[in-house]
Image (cartoon, rainbow, N blue to C red):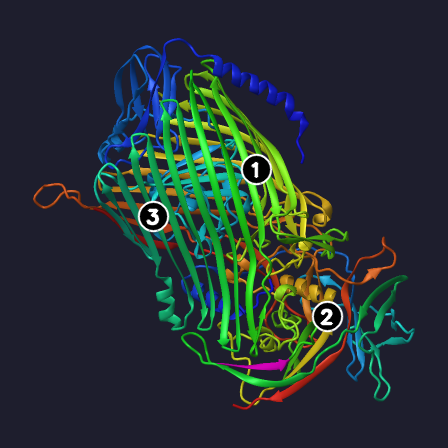
């Protein structure tokens, strides 16, 4: 166990502060608590603001379940409830005792939403303690021009500062210089181990079912842990509990349908959303072979209100991609997850949630030439999580959160059964088991009307469990394959290796004036499960592997400093500047020729090193008016230092982008038409060029005499996209409003058809030459989307 | 990536379909990758076939030097010594354009025997380079058969050769399959097929059984037509000769590196198969640790083989 003693004095001070604030109960203070919902469909609103007009320092924000609690001295108050896109409600309250006050906010009508000036400054970034967080509203996501006209949660993250991607078609995303496997992706609290469909062109999140998307890039709250880079918290809708609603869409690639409605009025509702692609049908037409790629997914959610204080939620996801290779080969993969949650309002100051989560990712690959010659290979990661969380609203703008998280993993590197010439061989590898546990406590307090502080500690513990075999590897030249020289077997439940890490988190905000604040944070995060991928883009076969006696947990420290302000007469511009610095230990890299699949000595092919990333993020958003949009610019560097690569010196990661500029603008032309354009510019990602070549048995091999990694760059990436949205008719011929709503989205991706480089590779020409002819070498540039891609989709709601 | 199935036809198809949709594209581009001092390349794959054995010594070239053959490294002293002290001298062939140094067997003589360890020693420009290899065992090739896959859609009819042999029981045998079509060695990077026991990777567990399908079929020519569509590896009357070469485990790992660096299909396959460019390792060392760098590989193989002419 390693406990960093340097944090102890700090922790003591914080504990004193916590006790002091808990003891500071005034006389005759009462609590108002309740849930804020959308009047039209009963969905709880996450992050809605509560503002006390008579007491400017008091305010609250609803949590992930729409619950709020605010404590005030006895008296008469006007309390304002607001949420973006909804009408504001002001309640007059005569506070003489604790009271429950549930609020239902009516959504702004379509016309009002765009024309009426909505005062959102009270929920703006400058007022909120959170930093390094981006919230993407599903309505904003739906406005962005999308590839093939299909709106996508993960693709839209690309327009945020600090988020990048290796290139089109690569699955996952990179946050502040972290790798794809360093993001914790949660779908209703269930970890998603592969967030993409169709090899990365689309993500598993069905936009019809998604309610709220929040990306934590830094200042990660202590309730989250397990990844060093970021947390993407995706929350699903609960299902309309007022009336049955059907949403759907028909696009070039797939169709969507979502049905939601009440099961028992005001007590229970459901949501079922499905998607199915049809590219395979098209390619079957072309090839009449079992060749093609298709996917489907099903997202379901239901909830039941037990009583005023207790509510149950059950959500589930099932998705599968099918890659038809030929008639006798198969390759498919997918996620499944389920989350059961129990919300309880213990009393006006105590809120609790207990979640039980199951998540599984698996793939299956095989061929079946005939019954005597076949092969079947399955691999999976299965995860069970139990997570009780408690919030205590102590009053005086102070909130205490604490909880536990216990996560049990089962890794199945490969279950392989092969038959060759009638003989069957089982060459499955043993499963691996691990337990990850964490306890956390976090306290948010307003120290003065200007200074707010949130501090906390997460203590994580990881145990790599038997049954299993621990290998000891020899030392060799860094970068060479290491071989196991000793092994030790462990019985079921025996601990093979264990680690623990204290993870302090602290963030603070100083309000300079009503519109401007400065924020700073520090967070340490530890990661115990590792994503193994050595290709430019991750692929469905990439596996997750636990920390072992050889693979150490990765630990990251991130420091951030930011300036937030609202500009303009009506504060309709929001500007922020944030800087970050992160260092990580035990980053994984790979020896050349590493065998990542079906290798029980995988650890011998892995290298371990250090990482660092730093940058500046600028963001300017115009929130109101006929023209809205934002400009996001990131200047950053992401590097690794690994013994055995690049002569042991720092080198840029494959996704390092010096400049990353995104501009998004929307214009509402009239009630029928609106348009959105976006432009992206990124520095080309790093690559390595050979400067020499030689022949080995007639095969031409590239060689780099400097023995460097990623010291060259691809050409810059830039792209313009356009989308035009046409609302369907809203009134019938007889002048009455139509019950059904529909709209068309026409979009053009990559308008000027630039062939942006995904990679540059070097190879010999495919011609056969004799030993006495010089081999011809070539450099190739691969563009994943090499042309303009127009598309149209039809969407409806009734 | 050592997949137990051959994904190559799939990528060909994917690349074609993506090109059809004007999605991904693969353009030849001009890049100046600079120039560097050449290094010595020792290409030393010898075996126990009853024929002259050659070791090639050349110098590396600038990557885009497409006009010249690699310069010959002349004037070296090359010998292989076995663990019993027997020395095999490799004599420079002054007329060779490929830097060949040759050992000529006497009548009926072969180089090496299974289980014996060999040391290669090359003296060049005052530096000495050494490497070691042990000749491993090899099973016989039992037969060759024809495999037919009917063409559908954009795929033409495919005729392929398939060989049948059984791995020797006991874990850790590694092989390189070398095939000749109509007498010509198939030596594209995409035609490298290696085996670990009867499977494709160390973890596959196929020990002492018939080689698995992707290995058995991994002896075919890989050619494309003008439209980059794969052509049938065999046409009526073609002959195929397949050789099983026993290789050392380090040679097996070396081939994996070669494949990952040299076998690039391009197009959309870049998404999933592109590992970063890195130098392929070598088992040859300079006895002076601070001396010149060297590339290449030394392996002494036992070889079995069988051929067949295909009529269909």
Q: Find residue A588 and report its horizontal and vertical position in percent.
A: 63, 47
In the figure, A501 relative to A710: above or below? above
Mark number, residue A300 = 3
Q: Secondary structure at mark 3?
A: strand
Could one spot residue A238 in this view of the protein?
yes
Q: Nearer the viewer, mark 3 or mark 1?
A: 3
In the figure, A686 relative to A620: above or below? below
Could one spot residue A583 in this view of the protein?
no
Cα distance in 3D space between marks 3 and 2: 64 Å
Residue segment shown in magenta: B158-165
A659 falls in the magenta region: no
Q: Find residue A387 and report its horizontal and vertical position in percent.
A: 47, 37
Q: Contact, CB < 8 Å: mark 3 with mark 2?
A: no
Report the chain holding disc 1. Answer: A
In the figure, A251 relative to A232: above or below? below
In the figure, A630 relative to A101: above or below? below
B164 falls in the magenta region: yes
Q: How packed is label 3: few (under 14 Cα within 10 Å), some, or many (20 or more)?
A: many
Q: How packed is label 1: few (under 14 Cα within 10 Å), some, or many (20 or more)?
A: many
Q: How packed is label 2: few (under 14 Cα within 10 Å), some, or many (20 or more)?
A: some
Return the residue at label 2.
B69
Return the residue at label 1.
A636
- Residue A784 located left or right of residue B143: left
């Amino acid at each position: 166990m390693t406990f960093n003693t340097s944090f102890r004095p700090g922790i003591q001070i914080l504990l004193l502060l916590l006790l002091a604030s808990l003891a500071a109960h005034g006389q005759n203070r009462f609590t108002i608590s309740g849930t804020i919902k959308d009047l039209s469909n009963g969905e709880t609103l996450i992050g809605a603001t509560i503002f006390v007009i008579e007491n400017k320092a008091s305010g609250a924000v609803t949590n992930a379940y729409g619950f709020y609690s605010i404590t005030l001295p006895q008296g008469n108050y006007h309390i304002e409830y607001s949420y973006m896109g909804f009408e504001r409600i002001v309640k007059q309250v005569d506070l003489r005792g604790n009271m429950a006050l549930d609020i239902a906010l009516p959504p702004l009508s379509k016309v009002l939403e765009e024309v009426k000036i909505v005062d959102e400054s009270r929920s703006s970034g400058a007022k909120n303690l959170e930093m390094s967080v981006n919230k993407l509203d599903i309505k904003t996501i739906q406005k962005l021009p999308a590839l093939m006209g299909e709106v996508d949660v993960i693709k839209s993250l690309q327009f945020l500062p600090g988020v990048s991607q290796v290139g089109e078609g690569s699955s996952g995303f990179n946050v502040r210089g972290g790798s794809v496997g360093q993001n914790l992706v949660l779908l209703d609290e269930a970890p998603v181990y592969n967030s993409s469909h169709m090899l990365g062109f689309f993500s598993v999140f069905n936009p019809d079912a998604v309610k709220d998307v929040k990306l934590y890039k830094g200042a990660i709250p202590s309730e989250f842990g397990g990844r060093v880079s970021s947390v993407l918290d995706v929350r699903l809708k609960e299902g309309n509990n007022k009336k049955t609603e059907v949403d759907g869409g028909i696009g070039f690639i797939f169709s969507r349908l979502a049905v939601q409605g009440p099961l028992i009025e005001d007590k229970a509702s459901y949501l079922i959303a499905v998607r199915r692609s049809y590219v395979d049908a098209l390619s079957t037409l072309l090839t009449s072979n079992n060749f093609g790629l298709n996917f489907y997914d099903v997202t379901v959610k239901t909830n039941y209100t037990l009583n005023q204080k207790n509510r149950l939620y059950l959500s589930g996801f099932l998705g599968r991609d099918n890659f038809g290779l030929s008639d006798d080969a198969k390759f498919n993969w997918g996620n499944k997850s389920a989350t059961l949650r129990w919300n309880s309002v213990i009393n006006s100051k105590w809120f609790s949630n207990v979640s039980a989560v199951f998540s599984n990712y698996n793939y299956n690959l095989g061929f079946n030439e005939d019954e005597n010659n076949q092969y079947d290979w399955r691999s999976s990661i299965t995860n069970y999580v139990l997570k009780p969380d408690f919030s205590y609203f102590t009053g005086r703008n102070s909130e205490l959160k604490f909880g536990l998280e216990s996560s049990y993993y089962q890794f199945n590197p490969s279950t392989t059964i092969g038959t060759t010439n009638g003989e069957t061989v089982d060459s499955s590898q043993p499963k691996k088991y691990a337990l990850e546990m964490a306890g956390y406590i976090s306290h948010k307090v307003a120290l003065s009307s200007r200074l707010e502080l949130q501090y906390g500690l997460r203590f994580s513990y990881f145990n790599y469990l038997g049954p299993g075999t621990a290998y000891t590897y020899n030392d060799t030249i860094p970068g060479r394959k290491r071989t196991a020289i000793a092994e030790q077997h462990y019985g079921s439940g025996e601990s093979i290796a264990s680690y623990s890490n204290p993870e302090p988190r602290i963030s603070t905000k100083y309000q300079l004036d009503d519109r401007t604040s400065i924020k700073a944070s520090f967070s340490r995060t530890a990661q115990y499960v590792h994503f193994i991928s050595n290709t430019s883009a991750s692929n469905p076969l990439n596996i997750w592997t636990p920390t072992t006696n050889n693979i150490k947990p990765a630990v990251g420290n991130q420091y951030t400093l930011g300036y937030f302000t609202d500009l303009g007469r009506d504060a309709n511009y929001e500007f922020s500047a944030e800087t970050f610095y992160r260092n990580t230990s035990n980053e994984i890299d790979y020896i050349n020729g590493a065998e990542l699949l079906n290798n029980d000595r995988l650890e011998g092919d892995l290298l371990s090193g250090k990482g660092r990333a730093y940058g500046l993020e600028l963001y300017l958003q115009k929130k109101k008016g006929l023209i809205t949009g934002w400009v996001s610019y990131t200047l950053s560097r992401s590097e690794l230092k690994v013994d055995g690569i690049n002569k042991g010196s720092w080198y840029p990661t494959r996704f390092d982008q010096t400049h990353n500029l995104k501009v998004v603008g929307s214009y509402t032309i009239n009630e029928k038409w609106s348009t959105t354009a976006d432009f992206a510019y990124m520095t080309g990602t790093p690559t390595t060029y050979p400067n020499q070549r030689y022949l080995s048995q007639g095969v031409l091999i590239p060689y780099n005499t400097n023995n460097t990694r990623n010291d060259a760059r691809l050409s810059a990436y830039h792209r313009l996209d356009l989308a035009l949205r046409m609302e369907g008719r809203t009134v019938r011929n007889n002048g009455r409003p139509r019950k059904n709503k529909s709209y068309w989205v026409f979009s053009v991706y990559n308008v000027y058809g630039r062939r942006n480089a995904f990679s540059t590779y070097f190879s010999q020409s495919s011609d056969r030459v004799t030993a006495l002819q010089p081999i011809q070498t070539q450099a190739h540039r691969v563009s994943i989307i090499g042309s303009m891609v127009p598309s149209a989709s039809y969407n409806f709601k009734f | 990536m050592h997949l137990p199935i051959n994904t190559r036809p799939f990528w060909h198809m994917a690349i074609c379909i993506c090109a059809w949709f004007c999605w991904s594209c693969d353009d030849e581009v001009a890049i100046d990758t600079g120039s560097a001092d050449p290094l010595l390349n020792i290409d030393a794959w010898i075996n126990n076939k009853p024929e002259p054995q050659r070791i090639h010594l050349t110098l590396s070239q600038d990557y885009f030097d497409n006009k010249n053959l690699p310069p010959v490294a002349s004037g070296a002293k090359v010998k292989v010594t076995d663990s019993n002290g027997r020395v095999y001298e490799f004599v420079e062939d002054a007329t060779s354009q490929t830097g060949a140094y040759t050992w000529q067997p006497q009548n009926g003589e072969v180089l090496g025997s299974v289980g014996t360890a060999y040391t290669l020693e090359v003296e060049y420009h005052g530096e000495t380079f050494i490497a070691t290899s042990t000749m491993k065992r090899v099973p016989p090739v039992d037969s060759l058969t024809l495999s037919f896959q009917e063409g559908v859609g954009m795929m033409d009819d495919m005729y392929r050769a398939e060989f049948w042999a059984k791995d020797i029981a006991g874990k850790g045998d590694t092989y390189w399959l070398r095939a000749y079509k109509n007498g010509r060695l198939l030596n594209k990077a995409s035609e490298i097929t290696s085996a670990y026991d009867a499977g494709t990777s160390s973890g596959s567990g196929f020990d002492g059984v018939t080689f698995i399908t992707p290995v058995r079929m991994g002896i075919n020519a890989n050619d494309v037509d003008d439209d980059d569509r794969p052509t049938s590896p065999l046409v009526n009357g073609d002959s195929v000769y397949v050789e099983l070469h026993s290789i050392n485990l380090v040679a097996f790992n070396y081939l994996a590196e070669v494949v990952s660096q040299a076998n690039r299909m391009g197009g959309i396959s870049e998404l999933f198969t592109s590992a970063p460019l890195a130098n392929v390792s070598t088992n040859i060392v300079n006895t002076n640790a601070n001396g010149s760098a060297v590339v290449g590989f030394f392996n002494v193989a036992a070889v079995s083989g069988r051929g067949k002419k295909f009529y269909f």
